[in-house]
Amino acid sequence: MDWFTAPDYWLGRLIFQRALAGVYLVAFVGAALQFRALIGANGMLPVPEYVRIVPFRRAPSLFQLRYSDRLFAGCAWTGALVAAALLAGAGDLVPLGGAMALWALLWLLYLSIVNVGQTWYAFGWESLLLEVGFLAVFLGNADVGPPVLVLWLLRWVLFRVEFGAGLIKMRGDACWRKLTCLYYHHETQPMPGPLSWFFHHLPRPVHRVECAANHVTQLLVPVFLFTPQPVASIAAGTIIATQLWLVISGNFAWLNWITITVAVSAVDFTGLAGPPPPAAGRGAPLWYAVLVFAVTVLVLVLSRHPVRNMISRRQVMNRSFDVLHLVNTYGAFGTVGRIRDEVVMEGTADEVPHADGDWREYGFKGKPTELGRMPRQFAPYHLRLDWLMWFAALSPGYARDWFGPFVERLLTGDRDTLRLLRHNPFPDAPPVYVRARLYRYRFTTWRELRETGAWWHRTLLREYLPPARLAEPRPTDSAPA
């Protein structure tokens, strides 16, 4: 079956697999370092409580069978170690079946995390990592040439990521059609990066060119992924360039990096890579070919849901249509905010909270709080609390499930929660009261930056949460009157 494999794509597969392993590594390390405060046994949204309510069939996960923080940490760090090994090339040092088993283990471990992660893991790039990670299981290793069918399935993923995002924009906010969305986006995006201030202050004609280029890249270029080379490589390269532009203008976890990773698999490196290794030209084992055919049929059948969604006038973005996240729909920024509001957390040690008392602010690692602190680059690492705080500022409804537990953990000085923050203003003892205030933030002008050194300007809007303290313990029957 010479037609079954494409040996000339061996270098593209190698780069794809190493890059995907790197994304997996970042995802697992992030899970290991943040889970205790978010979804641990004593976290804001504990996994044990979730799995008691949600059955296995709706959220298949290893943690449906048993959960402990030690087990979760073990799974996360195991995933990180396997990802690091694949990044170093371990997949090409073992037989084909062994390499597939390693990729399958990564997929299973991360699926188990996402399916109990609740709102902390409700991001499109989680499903994208799982969908791409599932296909990677069947991409083979140095013992066999890259299967043509899997390479096409990866292009199908890339097409849906880009085309779906383009459609949601054209059907959504009118500013995309007017080419004005980037007048605001760099300032109001969830987590600006170190260059976002400068992007925001580009001339407005440049912003309009950015918008127009985005439409071309997302609505026209993806079609050429399915054309012969070198056109498909040019299309993939255009997508990669656009994604790198997004990398330097904001923090979107690993969304841009995994999109780049998938795009690499569509590039024909024949002119640069030289002849493929001899092993890549060997015929594929029958059992392997059968598996690839079966997966291809499965993906095509499951694709009917994303296709219906894309052609629907009520298109939704970032939706999984199966509990295994095998084939999903994607999209981003169907609506672009014109203003930026931020929830600022404060605490006081005063026994009686006065409005003008000694209130001290908590500092976050990524989200804007301190006016003179330049935005930092964190992507591809995902600061989950910081991202959810952006949603909390949009509407308290987005934070209904976790904001109260978050405040409670600040009041108790919970060590795991405080590790998610950059600055704890109460290092010796937790505050007596915690409150939240809503501010309107905007980037400073060039003149304001020169005169004050501040990257942000803010104006108090209103109280978001009145001063709250831990509930007083109720007296028991045996307690003295």
Image (cartoon, rainbow, N blue to C red):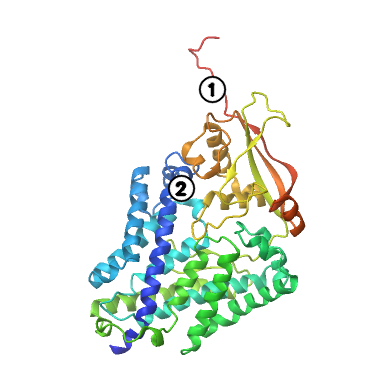
In whole angstroms, how far apart are the C-alphas of marks 1 and 2? Answer: 30 Å
Question: Helix or strand or loop: what does disc 1 sit on?
Answer: loop
Task: Say whether marks 1 and 2 touch (CB < 8 Å).
Answer: no
* 194 versus 212 height, above or below: above
- Residue under label 1, please give it: 473
Front-most of 178 and 15? 15
User: Residue type at mark 1?
Assistant: Pro
Closer to the N terminus: mark 1 or mark 2? 2
* Relative vertical location of residue 462 with respect to residue 225 in this rendering, above or below: above
Image quadrant in which you'd find residue 115: bottom left
Instruction: Give coordinates of residue 458: x percent, y percent.
Output: 73, 48
Comparing 221 with 121, the one in front is 221
Taking depth in this image into account, of 73 and 277 the one nearest to the observer is 277
Instruction: Please identify, in this view, whether the residue under mark 1 or under mark 2 is nearer the observer.
Output: 2
Residue 34's tag is 2
Tell me if 438 is positioned left or right of 33 in this view: right
